[in-house]
Image (tube, grey):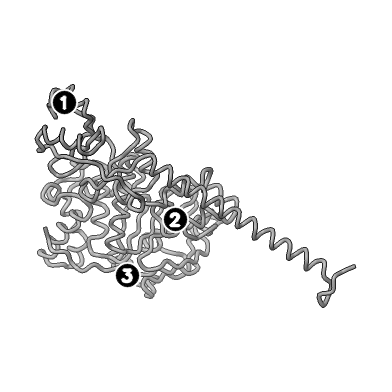
Amino acid sequence: MAETTTTAHGASIELENLTKRYPGSAQPAVDDVSMEIKAGETVVFVGPSGCGKSTTLKMINRLIEPTGGRIRIGGEDVTDIDPVKLRRKVGYAIQSAGLFPHMTVAQNIALVPRMVGWPKKRIKDRVEELLDLVGLDPGEFHGRYPRQLSGGQQQRVGVARALAADPPVLLMDEPFGAVDPITRDHLQDELIRLQHELHKTIVFVTHDFDEAIKLGDRIAVLRERSHIAQFDTPEAILTNPADDFVSGFVGAGAALKRLNLTRVRDVEMRDYPTVTVDTPLQQIFGHLRSSGTNEILLLDRRRRPYKWLRRGDLMRAKGSLARAGTLVHDTVTRDGTLRDALEAVLTDNAGRVAVTGRRGEYIGVVDMETLMNSVHELLEADRLEAMEAQHELEETRAEQTHREQEGPGGVTKA
């Protein structure tokens, strides 16, 4: 594998009175938006269709030129610099990846580094490094064309291309909107993992509030013309929406939505007994006896979950691993959310799911008991928060009543 290079971390973004007017329109598409995004932060724009969230995003790298206002990246005013140079410093990933079909995966990723004049050796190493980073084997995918990739693989290459010149800022315009729900979950987990490693400043557009909760350090809920209804942490928006418009986005079941805020890595996992496909049968039986359980997890040669094996399965299959057990259909990653885990556990007959690492390797098991305990803790936290808020409200009302009953100089009215 290529040697990892020093990575540039994120840069702050300041939008000051940013406005976009199109000729012939009575109202601006984006109206006087001001916002500060911290370096290394993931901020998600969420709002109804046509509210101007994508237009606002595209003004940051000036794919759409602002009619008015300023943009600063890392303190530098980029409103008047060459937009082509600006776009080479800002990564950009869109829905359906937007890869050039006539270029290989490597050529697509190398595009911006080649344009800014990187040496060939540095480009080659960077392509290899990024393919590895987004979970694609460089040897396998280097020479493929986009048409030879699945939708999820194309999106990974799209993210790699956006990161190729090591920009401090990454703009993502509904990048996972065109893939199936399972692939989307995995891509979201991959982005969370990448951000843990890279600390870029990410601005992400979505219409899916659950996706916003899962990915965002802060969420900007936008009304029409990109007016900011609320700009806060996911926890604050879930527990204290600013108004009815924001409440409509939160929707029902705020406590359950908070499962999107807790990662699988944050809860206790069971250390399940495991064997590999190369383990002799007698040893597997021995493991089952000594573990005190009726089930064991069979891993493949790369230590990825492969089959759930029960003692009865082995007996009925007459000792053949090929015919024994139940294939592992679903796993969750360490960076997945408790909601991902709950969905997997609810569709599993035995109420458990295997947890995997970056390469799909087995880490542990999360079961229904662990998840139910977490749900109860979240509900209890919500209940206590609501009680505290009610108590504060009653105290405020009591103080107000007391003040109203007092005349000037603190004299109680007759």
Horizontal and vertical percent position of residue 400: 74, 65
- Mark 3: few/some/many CA within 10 Å (<14, 14-19, 20+): few
Spatial CA distance of label 3 from label 1 is: 64 Å
Horizontal and vertical percent position of residue 21: 49, 60
- In terms of secondary structure, where does tag 2 sit? strand
The foreground one among 375 and 119 is 375
Spatial CA distance of label 3 from label 2 is: 26 Å
Spatial CA distance of label 1 from label 2 is: 49 Å
Which amino acid lies under the numbered mark 1 shown in the image of this protein? Arg
- In terms of secondary structure, where does tag 3 sit? loop
Give the side of residue 267 with respect to residue 399, left or right. Answer: left
**Residue 343 in sight from this viewpoint:** yes
**Residue 23 in sight from this viewpoint:** no
Disc 1 target residue: 323
Which of the image's four quarters has the N terminus?
A: bottom left
The foreground one among 155 and 371 is 371
Q: Nearer the viewer, mark 1 or mark 2?
A: 1
Q: Are marks 3 and 1 in contact (CB under 8 Å)?
A: no
Which amino acid lies under the numbered mark 3 shown in the image of this protein? Asp
Give the side of residue 66 with respect to residue 276, left or right. Answer: right
Which amino acid lies under the numbered mark 2 shown in the image of this protein? Phe
Disc 2 target residue: 45
Disc 3 target residue: 82
